[in-house]
């Protein structure tokens, strides 16, 4: 507890993820808002009455929460059926029952406003899901604050239009009752359209203030010239524009009344109450704009970090590739000098190596069978050079044992290269190389052991470490460790050790990986690899 408080983290990331991902939590907005409206309408001041209202509303709305819960935890037709039951059938049934039975309606704390809030919350959730998927019915949609506010304006304008169209001459008969008359709305569709267009224009006046604040005052003035310039220019803009925008609102036909639909409630465009709503738009939109900008910057930073990691990984792979080429060319050169009859096979194996490096070396993943085939060709070329002074013990699985497992290319051969470069080639004595690879389910265990030359054991370049060890601890192992950290974070174990034996020291490398498996869709086409489970890293 104290550690969390001292670090400023009262909730873990896992707990925060659970809270944010809880689809029932937004519905609680309607519950608390209805309870507070109930307290306001009846002028109640007791906390007991407030908690009593919350309890009654929780019981009344529990069927909605249950339907939402079952909808989230099902799929297909069941998911849709539960959603329709909770947000269509249930609200319609309650509203019809409240209208038919007066006593039933008086017993309920939830009103049509409650159900409208629930529907608006669900609509917002659907819009958020569509924006997250970045497409609505297959059409790509830019998830920006401007687009979200535009959708909200259209929805609010429609809500106002429905309310105004439900009453005869509503602005001359204020206050307007919060009642929707579906029969009247259907009977006068042109009135609904007229009110909708006018309310859209009314909200557009405020939307213009937001756009200027967002794209000029915040993005350019505040970010480049500071707070003082932003405040002075914002104040000047509000003072200049508010009477003009108020006049546009008064020119609307529905506002040709004594008490128009504006902030001042009169026909005076210069009334200072008209600047109140404009100032409110600027004051509310500023933190929202800053929050969206912060989220956008955070996303860009994450993308840049990912690009940096990918670039670093490609650099590491390209750094390894020339070493493969030079080693194998040297091997082939030695065979040609000795006019060995095995040179044609060596050339073919070299071609296989180069083909793999050129076409597969830059891939994120290749099949494990291809990687093992590369190891076979590499070991075959090396055997041609050192088989007279090295005893090989190779145990590599066949293709049937590897299945559809995927691995990062040119990862395992680095251990073999270092075994030959620092253990076998400089040795004047008989050397030994043991290579084994086993696969169980999706776990790969690779082991490489080679003897360290006696001459190298007599010069220690680092206390407690022979030259062979010291060389291997250089850039080669660092590259492998970095690649493992990038490609298999927390999904690998790498152990490097030196063992003293009667015949000398043996250098051992053991790597354990939890690999990915390529999956296939219904048509037999390869799909995305299944990510491996994470294990503790030790390297």
Image: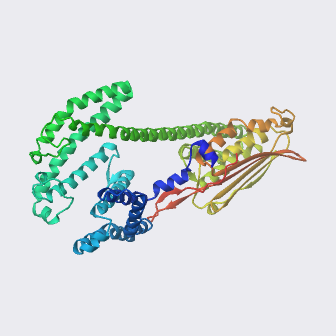
Location of residue 508 in the rendering, given as x and y in whole percent from the top left corner: 77, 47
Q: Is residue 389 left or right of residue 239?
A: right
Number of numbered labels in the structure image: 0
Residue 425 visible: no
Residue 411 visible: yes
Q: Is residue 437 left or right of residue 224?
A: right
Location of residue 412 in the rendering, given as x and y in whole percent from the top left corner: 66, 48
Q: Is residue 500 left or right of residue 13?
A: right
The image's colour scheme reads rainbow
Location of residue 418 in the rendering, given as x and y in whole percent from the top left corner: 72, 41
Q: Is residue 100 left or right of residue 81?
A: left
Of the pair 518 and 19, the residue shown nearer to us: 19
Of the pair 252 and 168, the residue shown nearer to us: 168
Position of the C terminus, as image quadrant, is top right
Of the pair 92 and 433, the residue shown nearer to us: 92
Q: At x 21% / y 51%, what residue is drawn?
A: 157
Q: Quadrant of residue 147?
A: top left
Residue 181 versus residue 19 in the image, above or below: below
Q: At x 34% / y 29%, what residue is drawn?
A: 220
Of the pair 497 and 349, the residue shown nearer to us: 497
Q: Quadrant of residue 318?
A: top right
């Amino acid at each position: 507890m104290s550690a969390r408080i001292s670090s400023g983290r009262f909730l873990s990331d896992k707990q925060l993820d659970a809270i944010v991902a809880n689809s029932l939590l937004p519905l609680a907005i309607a519950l608390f808002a209805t309870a507070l409206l109930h307290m306001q309408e009846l002028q109640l001041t007791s906390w007991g009455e407030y908690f009593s209202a919350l309890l009654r509303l929780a019981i009344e709305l529990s069927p909605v929460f249950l339907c939402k819960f079952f909808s989230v935890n099902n799929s297909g037709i069941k998911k849709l059926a539960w959603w329709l039951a909770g947000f269509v059938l249930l609200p319609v049934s309650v509203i019809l029952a409240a209208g038919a039975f007066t006593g039933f309606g008086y017993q309920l704390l939830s009103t049509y406003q409650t159900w409208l809030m629930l529907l608006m919350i669900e609509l917002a959730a659907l819009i958020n899901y569509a924006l997250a998927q970045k497409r609505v019915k297959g059409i790509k949609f830019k998830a920006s604050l401007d687009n979200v506010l535009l959708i909200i304006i259209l929805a609010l304008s429609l809500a106002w239009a429905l309310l105004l169209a439900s009453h005869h001459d509503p602005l001359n008969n204020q206050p307007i009752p919060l009642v929707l008359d579906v029969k009247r709305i259907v009977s006068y569709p042109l009135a609904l359209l007229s009110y909708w267009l006018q309310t859209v224009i009314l909200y557009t006046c405020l939307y213009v203030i937001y756009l200027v604040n967002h794209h000029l005052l915040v993005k350019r003035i505040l970010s480049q010239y500071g707070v003082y310039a932003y405040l002075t220019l914002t104040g000047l803009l509000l003072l200049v524009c508010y009477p003009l925008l108020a006049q546009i609102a008064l020119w609307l036909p529905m506002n040709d009344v004594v008490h128009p639909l504006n902030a001042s409630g009169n026909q005076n465009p210069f009334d200072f109450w008209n600047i109140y709503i404009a100032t409110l738009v600027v004051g509310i939109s500023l933190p929202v704009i800053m929050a969206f900008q912060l989220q956008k910057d955070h996303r860009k930073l994450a993308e840049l970090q990912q690009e940096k990691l990918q670039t670093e990984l490609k650099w590491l792979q390209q750094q390894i590739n020339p070493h493969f080429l030079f080693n194998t060319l040297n091997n082939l050169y030695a065979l040609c000098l000795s006019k060995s009859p095995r040179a044609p096979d060596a050339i073919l194996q070299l071609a296989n190596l180069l083909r793999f490096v050129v076409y597969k070396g830059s891939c994120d993943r290749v099949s494990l069978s291809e990687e093992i085939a590369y190891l076979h060709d590499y070991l075959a070329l090396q055997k041609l050079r050192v088989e007279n002074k090295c005893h090989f013990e190779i145990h590599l699985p066949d293709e049937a044992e590897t299945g559809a497992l995927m691995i990062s290319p040119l990862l395992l051969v680095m251990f073999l290269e270092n075994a030959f470069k620092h253990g076998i080639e400089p040795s004047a004595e008989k050397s030994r190389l043991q290579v084994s690879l086993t696969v169980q389910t999706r776990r790969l265990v690779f082991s490489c052991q080679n003897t360290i030359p006696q001459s190298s054991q007599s010069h220690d370049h680092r206390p407690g470490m022979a030259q062979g060890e010291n060389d291997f601890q250089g850039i080669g192992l660092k590259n492998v460790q970095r690649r493992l950290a990038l490609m298999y974070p927390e999904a690998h174990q790498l152990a490097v050790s030196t063992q003293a034996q009667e015949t000398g020291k043996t250098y051992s490398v053991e790597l354990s990986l939890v690999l990915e498996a390529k999956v296939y869709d219904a048509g037999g086409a390869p799909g995305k690899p299944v990510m491996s489970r994470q294990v503790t890293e030790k390297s």
